[in-house]
Image (spheres, grey):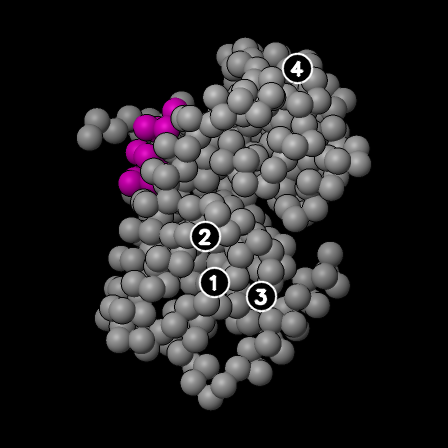
């Protein structure tokens, strides 16, 4: 993995060095998602808006679909300065500042309104500030990635149905909490390699939001979509510290405003999509299972503040998150 990260970072540096003389205004934004997903289309929108609002002083090129490396690689490249901005999951950000990964604990949110309340909370601002202090980077926005659901080649109705299952999870420690709760064998695999791993039986299943299952075509190699809704996933938009220090106060304000708006647009596009996709999967001939979510929740709750299970937050953080009320507007 270290060799992969280093190779990706050196490739990004070489590509940057080859850019023309005006490259000081050209920025590289990297992520691992497909070009038809709202995260990417809204990143393109944000790039255009920033160019307009800064009189073309800053031009952002967006590199999707792991073009500049997998998620650990682009996080490392952000620190090296060979990539200027990224989307990254909060669980990956938690490798640098553990408390910010709290939103990835399984069933830590009651529902989407609870997630929205967290997005707009002082608690999240504190989490972002803690990450910024720990890394020297600047977190700009939080985007709803969607509720994560399991796909498999069998029906899953209760946690014990996943016992011993080889479950692909992302390459970040907190994803192990869900696997541990249900007794699955967690198998970290890079995002770009998941389809093949499902196809050849390296793993028995995977878990992702419905829009991602559609965009990455995982349903082609899995027969069942199981609506576990176990993690309300979030993405952070992060500007590298080297970039942030170069920006004027006025340009920083533009970046923050535009990326927050892009995050909001992507959030509600994803929310709309995931409400309609179960019927779309049924139309593709897939079996959509509505499991006993209470049983899954009860299996996960005892691990929420278990440091050995990956909890890197304090009990105060957890209690404040649970106390957040649902939005009414």
Instruction: Provide the residue span drawn in magenta.
Output: 111-121
Q: Earlier in the sequence, mark 2 or mark 3?
A: 2
- Asked if marks 2 and 1 touch (Cβ < 8 Å), the reply is yes
Q: Residue visible at 41% across and 52% down?
A: 41
Q: Which residue is mark 1?
A: 62
Spatial CA distance of label 2 from label 3 is 19 Å
Among the 4 quarters of the image, the one containing residue 269: top left
Foreground: disc 1 or disc 3: 1
Q: Secondary structure at mark 3?
A: helix
Q: Earlier in the sequence, mark 1 or mark 4?
A: 1
Q: Secondary structure at mark 2?
A: helix
Q: Which mark is residue 77?
A: 3
Q: Earlier in the sequence, mark 4 or mark 2?
A: 2
Q: Residue visible at 68% across and 62% down?
A: 5
Q: Which residue is mark 4?
A: 155
Spatial CA distance of label 4 from label 3 is 40 Å
Q: Residue visible at 64% across and 15% down?
A: 156
Along the viewing direction, whichever of 328 and 265 lies nearer the viewer: 265
Q: Residue 116 colored magenta?
A: yes
């Amino acid at each position: 993995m270290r060799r992969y990260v280093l190779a990706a970072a050196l490739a990004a540096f070489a590509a940057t060095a080859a850019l023309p003389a005006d490259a000081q205004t050209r920025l590289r934004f990297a992520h691992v998602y497909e070009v038809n997903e709202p995260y990417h289309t809204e990143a393109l929108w944000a790039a255009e808006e920033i160019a307009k609002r800064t009189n073309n002083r800053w031009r952002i090129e967006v590199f999707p679909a792991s073009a500049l490396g997998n998620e650990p690689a682009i996080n490392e490249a952000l620190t090296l300065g060979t990539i200027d901005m990224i989307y990254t999951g909060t669980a990956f950000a938690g490798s640098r500042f553990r408390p910010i990964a709290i939103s990835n604990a399984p069933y830590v949110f009651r529902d989407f309104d609870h997630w929205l309340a967290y997005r707009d909370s002082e608690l999240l601002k504190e989490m972002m500030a803690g990450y910024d202090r720990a890394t020297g980077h600047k977190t700009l926005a939080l985007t709803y990635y969607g509720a994560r659901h399991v796909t498999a080649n069998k029906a899953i109705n209760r946690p014990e149905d996943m016992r011993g299952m080889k479950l692909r999870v992302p390459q970040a420690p907190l994803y192990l909490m869900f696997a541990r709760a249900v007794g699955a064998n967690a198998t970290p695999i890079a995002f770009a390699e998941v389809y093949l791993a499902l196809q050849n039986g390296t793993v028995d299943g995977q878990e992702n939001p419905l829009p991602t299952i559609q965009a990455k075509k995982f349903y082609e190699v899995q027969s069942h979509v199981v609506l576990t809704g176990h993690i309300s996933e979030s993405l952070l938009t992060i500007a590298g510290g080297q970039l942030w220090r170069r920006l004027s106060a006025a340009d920083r304000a533009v970046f923050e405003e535009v990326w927050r708006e892009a995050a909001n647009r992507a959030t509600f596009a994803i929310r709309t999509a995931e409400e309609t996709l179960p019927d779309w999967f049924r139309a593709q001939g897939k079996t959509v299972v509505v499991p006993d979510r209470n049983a899954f929740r009860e299996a996960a709750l005892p691990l929420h503040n278990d440091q050995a299970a990956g909890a890197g937050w304090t009990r105060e953080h957890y209690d404040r998150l649970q106390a957040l009320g649902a939005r009414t507007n």
